[in-house]
Amino acid sequence: MRLSGPFYAMLAVTIFAAQDTITKVIGSSYSPVQITMVRYWAFALFAIVWALRSKKGFRQAIHTNHLWLQIARSFLLVGQIIISILSFAYVGLAMSQAIFAASPLVVAVLSVPLLGETVGWRRWLAIVIGMSGMMLIINPFGQELSPWLVMPVLCTLTLGFYNIMTRIAGRHDSAFVSFFYTGVIGLIVTSVVGPFFWAPITPVDWLWLGALCVTSVSGHYFLIKALALTEAVTVQTITYFQLVYELLIGYFIFTEDVTMVMLLGCVIVVAAGAFTIWREHAVKRANLKALKAAEAAAQPL
């Protein structure tokens, strides 16, 4: 039986929520650089094995004419993962993921100067509303602000830049090529820096790290399967379920504080982000339809 794209997307989101939970468990016991390095060992191995099994052959499967672009975006992802580990450890799953939900709004803003895209008034309004929702989540006037709150905000900005660079890379390379260089370059970077942050790992924590590697690889695999079977706009929207998971996990497992104001902010951010994603998709589809109509009209009778 062939499973659907949305099913694989939900499976990936569920696995990523489990991955973040494991990261939270061990994140305060070891350096985030060390944890990230172990994750990349599994990530890169998976990418290399996949490339070796390609019908095109290994060299053709990983060919890129934009190596420096792939290197730059891979560096950004390494930084984003390290910051997210700090965020989960010191801010919490619920608060961190709630702020991360604003990432599509950041991408929409950055797409104007960096990609030359046009954002209409509807999406600008959604961005303003979404950012106001993020301020409700942070709630700067209702509590004593922790300096660690800068971590999820910085992580959201870094993720936004990473997504923009991934879009640019997507104009030249396939999704698999970007996936391969993400894993291999991340492995090289973290393996060079990681030994300086190494601390002895207990047998129990090796089990946790093993589970972290399994969730990282399987989550990305199912996400790729989802994107191969359904439109990216559908997958992007489904990924918001990760926020629901992590709010519940943060509240019930880690006894994190989840207030009604925070929940209201989450609803606003998710609604604004989902609208931004769908509106961008609708505009691109309309532009493509208009381009095809113009090409058809230009054909000689």
Image (spheres, rainbow, N blue to C red):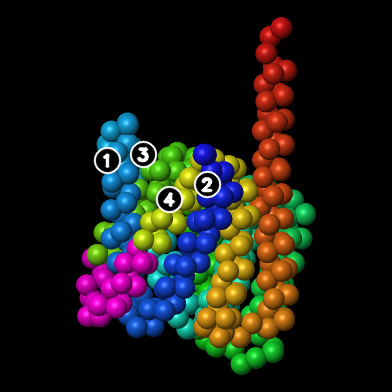
Residue 65 - label: 3
Residue 233 - label: none
Query: What's the distance in space between the residues labelled 4 and 3, CA to CA?
Result: 25 Å
Answer few, some or many: residues within 10 Å of disc 3's Cα (few below 14, many 20 plus, some between 14 and 19). few
**Residue denoted by label 4:** 221
x then y, percent, for residue 260: 72, 81
Q: Nearer the viewer, residue 261 or 164?
A: 261
User: Which badge, 4 or 2, comes first in the chain's sequence?
Assistant: 4
Magenta includes 197?
A: yes
Q: Is residue 143 above or below residue 1?
A: below
Which residue does the image show at 22% across and 72% down from the upper left?
195
SS category of the residue bearing label 2: helix
Q: Amino acid at mark 3?
A: Asn
User: Which badge, 4 or 1, comes first in the chain's sequence?
Assistant: 1
User: Which badge, 1 or 3, comes first in the chain's sequence?
Assistant: 1
Query: What's the distance in space between the residues labelled 4 and 2, CA to CA?
Result: 9 Å
- Highlighted range, magenta: 192-213
Query: What's the distance in space between the residues labelled 4 and 1, CA to CA?
Result: 16 Å
User: Which badge, 3 or 2, comes first in the chain's sequence?
Assistant: 3
Q: Amino acid at mark 4?
A: Tyr
Q: Amino acid at mark 2?
A: Ala
Q: Are marks 1 and 2 in contact (CB under 8 Å)?
A: no
**Residue denoted by label 1:** 52
Q: Are marks 4 and 3 in contact (CB under 8 Å)?
A: no
